[in-house]
Image (tube, helix red, strand yellow):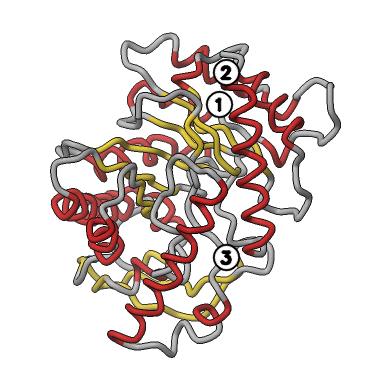
Amino acid sequence: MMEELITQEIGSFRKPTYLSSKFRSYKGNEFQEVAKRATLETLDLFEKSGLMNIGVGGEMYRWEMYEHPISRMDGIKIFGPVRSFDNRYYNKGSVYDNIERNEPFHVEEIHLFRELKRKNVKIPVTGPYTLMDWSFNDHYKNRADLAMAFGKIMNQEIRELKSAWGDEILQVQIDEPAATTRPEEMDIVLESVNESVKGIGGIETHLHVCYSTDYGLLFNIAPSLDVSVYNLEFANRDPTSLSGHRKGYDDVKRFKEVSDTMNRKISLGLGVTDIHRDFLEPPQLIKERIEYALKFLEPDRLRLNPDCGLRTRSREVGYEKLKNMVIARDEVARTL
């Protein structure tokens, strides 16, 4: 992890058709074998693209980020689908009693990566604030109490993942797409995320927040947030023209201003490819985005990633976006 300008996958990747078309039909060992096959195929794509940090293989073991953990908890009942973004839906749950974790969420992926003897593993988990915000609360006194209850459950999950991983550092990415949607609740975001990693050693904590209208809300709590790497979206808001002001990346300066006030090092995961379009950003465009960010941050405080998970694109387009990101990274690295 000492290399500069690490390229990283951010989470989800489009599932092969043989898995996605029958995802809910596979049971037991059959599901495990099919999910493992899809993971290995996706890892092969990641490695061919040149990625330095391959994550956990595109989240082949989970259908989506909310229902997967919720379905493994007691005290919450899953109802029908609601729309999240694009034409993507998740089955929303209602909390009717004290919530408890009744089985691990992601330990199969950790065991697979230990079996494969992989390094630089980063596992995405759904953050407690988003789990709270995306659920109906019919039991807890208020939203803060429910978020903290989810925080305690995620602490159990992350602690078990770290135990299964062993002595090496485990990168844990806490996905919080809802984090800045209610500016008046940033204290709840702060406290529940901190609860998720409280007392757990040997992890590097990432926070992934996508499509915020004001990352300043997040930067304001960064000094008190137990997070080392902030994986954020920038490309979606940036023009695709070359040799212009990279206005989509203005928040990089704001990140630097906050990080310079802190007595510990935090890094920025820079979104350099838009996951909502098939447009393949040419390496030169990505290179300009990286070089703009380097005006404010040292190379060892910058990581490169897509804006969000690439499950919204085909596997072919996702691969090409990652490959172009790596090409651009290598061109920049040669000049450092």
Could you tell me how far apart the alpha carbons at marks 1 and 2 are, in whole angstroms?
7 Å
Decide: marks 3, 2 in contact (CB < 8 A)?
no
Most foreground residue, 90 or 318: 318
Decide: marks 1, 2 in contact (CB < 8 A)?
yes
Q: Quadrant of the C terminus?
A: top right
Name the residue carrying label 2: 254
Decide: marks 3, 1 in contact (CB < 8 A)?
no
For label 1, the crowd category at 10 Å Cα-Cα, with few meaning under 14, some 14 to 19 and many 20 or more, is some
User: Whole-percent x and y of residue 43?
Assistant: 45, 58
Q: Residue at x 80, y 20 (%)?
A: 245
Mark number displayed over residue 216 = 1
Q: Quadrant of the N terminus?
A: top left
Point out the frontmost of discs 3 and 1: 3
Residue type at numbered disc 1: Gly
**As drawn, 28 above or below 69:** below
Mark number displayed over residue 14 = 3
Point out the frontmost of discs 3 and 2: 3
For label 2, the crowd category at 10 Å Cα-Cα, with few meaning under 14, some 14 to 19 and many 20 or more, is some
